[in-house]
Image (cartoon, rainbow, N blue to C red):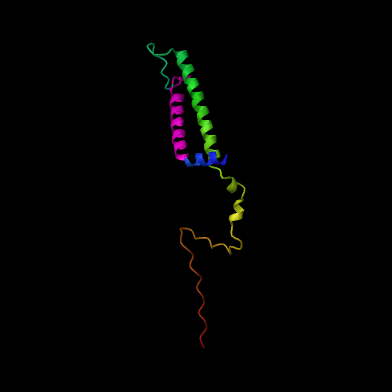
Amino acid sequence: MDAVRHFLHEWRLVLLVIHVGVTSAMIVVILLQRSEGGGLGMGGRSDALFSVRGQANILSRMTAIFATVFFVLSMIMAWSMTDPMRASRSIMDRVPVGSGAPAAPAAPGGMTPAAPAQPAAPTR
């Protein structure tokens, strides 16, 4: 299983490009569908290759296919990017022990506050 995870991790750029392509195709297919208000649907022509009902079936099936591929690719990429050794550790394990006092906050405007003036020592 680790070999598959390592292989997918090495191919993360290819998976990302495919994921973006599937996302773009799904957006286009959704925008081509006929909505109740007319939208960008193109089913109003009588000389179309498909009838309105056939076109709606094809577009809805394509939407379902693209959505399934999108979901599967998302899950594969999330699974392949996890590191089992890193997931078992806490973020608090990385905090150094006894890091000292916190730094003084900056003054408004990004300027550091000036040190208060010391009274001059009395001279004799």
Residue 6 in percent (x, y) is at: 52, 42
Residues 100 and 89: in front is 89
In this view, 74 is above or below 91: above
Q: Residue at x 46, y 25 (%)?
A: 30
Residues 17 and 56: in front is 17
In the image, is residue 110 part of the stretch drawn in magenta? no
Residues 13 and 48: in front is 13
Tell me the quarter of the image containing the N terminus: top right
Q: Residue at x 50, y 20 (%)?
A: 61
In this view, 73 is above or below 10: above
In this view, 27 is above or below 42: below
- Residue at the farthest top position: 46
- Residue at the farthest left position: 47
Give the overall secondary structure of the magenta segment: helix
How many numbered marks have been drawn onto this rendered protein structure? 0
In the image, is residue 27 part of the stretch drawn in magenta? yes
Q: Residue at x 47, y 40 (%)?
A: 12
- Residue at the farthest front position: 3
User: In the image, 88: left or right of 109?
Assistant: right
Residue 59 in percent (x, y) is at: 47, 20
Residue 26 in percent (x, y) is at: 46, 27
In this view, 119 is above or below 30: below
Residues 71 and 115: in front is 71
Q: Which residues are magenta?
A: 11-38
User: In the image, 85: left or right of 13?
Assistant: right
